[in-house]
Image: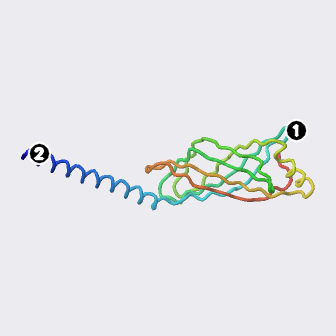
């Protein structure tokens, strides 16, 4: 009987410790997310690298500011590129980018597109000499508290073709 009560007491103590540990871990994760400031991502430039009969390539140059007191490692980046109102590219790259604490980093995203996707935009570019673009996507950051994914977006105007 005494051994049975001892086991019951031990089991209750173990459950209480496990519960406090779980509560503490979830509390730490919650505090960590509050302590994490989202990096600020801006589209710095879009440079057309080449255009051919089948399509072309461009570099989307992002300026990423890390406002945190610690460095961040970004491991994945998704993107969607719109020229005027036409979606011209959609993709994802896995590339390790280290963002220094309280600093700016330039991230170059190579993008391939088909000529069919940008035909209307190219017509407008040749007629008007410029065209508006928009880039949206998400960065995935590795933190001590797990991966955190945050969106980014930017707009601009492409004036003529720069090769």
Q: How is the image coloured?
A: rainbow
Give how far across and how far down residue 140 sits, in percent: 56, 49
Q: Residues within 10 Å of mark 1 (few under 14, many from 20)?
A: few
What residue sits 16% from the left and 48% below the top? 10
Instruction: Kindly identify which numbered label has been placed on residue 97.
Output: none
Position in image of residue 155 (x %, y %): 73, 59
Pointer 1 residue: 53
Identity of the residue drawn at 65% across and 52% down: 137
For the residues bearing labels 1 and 2, Cβ distance under 8 angstroms: no
Q: Residue furthest front?
A: 1
Task: Name the residue beneath numbered marker 2.
Answer: 4
Q: Is residue 12 left or right of residue 114?
A: left
Q: Position of residue 45 (x, y in %)?
A: 73, 54
In the rendered image, the quadrant that contains the C terminus is top right
| Front position in the image: 21 or 71 | 21
Identified at 84% across, 37% down, the residue is: 54
> Which of the pair 99/6 is nearer the observer?
6
């Amino acid at each position: 009987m005494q051994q049975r009560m001892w086991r019951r007491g031990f089991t209750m103590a173990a459950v209480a410790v496990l519960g406090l540990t779980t509560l503490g871990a979830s509390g730490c994760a919650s505090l960590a997310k509050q302590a994490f400031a989202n990096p600020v991502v801006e589209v710095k430039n879009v440079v057309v690298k080449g255009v051919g009969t089948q399509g072309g390539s461009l570099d989307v140059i992002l300026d990423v500011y890390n406002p945190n007191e610690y460095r961040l490692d970004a491991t994945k980046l998704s993107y969607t590129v719109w020229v005027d109102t036409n979606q011209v590219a959609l993709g994802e790259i896995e590339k390790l980018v280290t963002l220094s604490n309280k600093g700016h980093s330039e991230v170059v995203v190579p993008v391939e597109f088909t000529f069919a996707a940008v035909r209307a935009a190219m017509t407008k570019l040749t007629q008007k000499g410029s065209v508006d673009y928009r880039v949206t996507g998400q960065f995935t950051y590795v933190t001590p508290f797990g991966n955190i994914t945050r969106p980014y977006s930017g707009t601009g105007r492409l004036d003529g073709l720069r090769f």
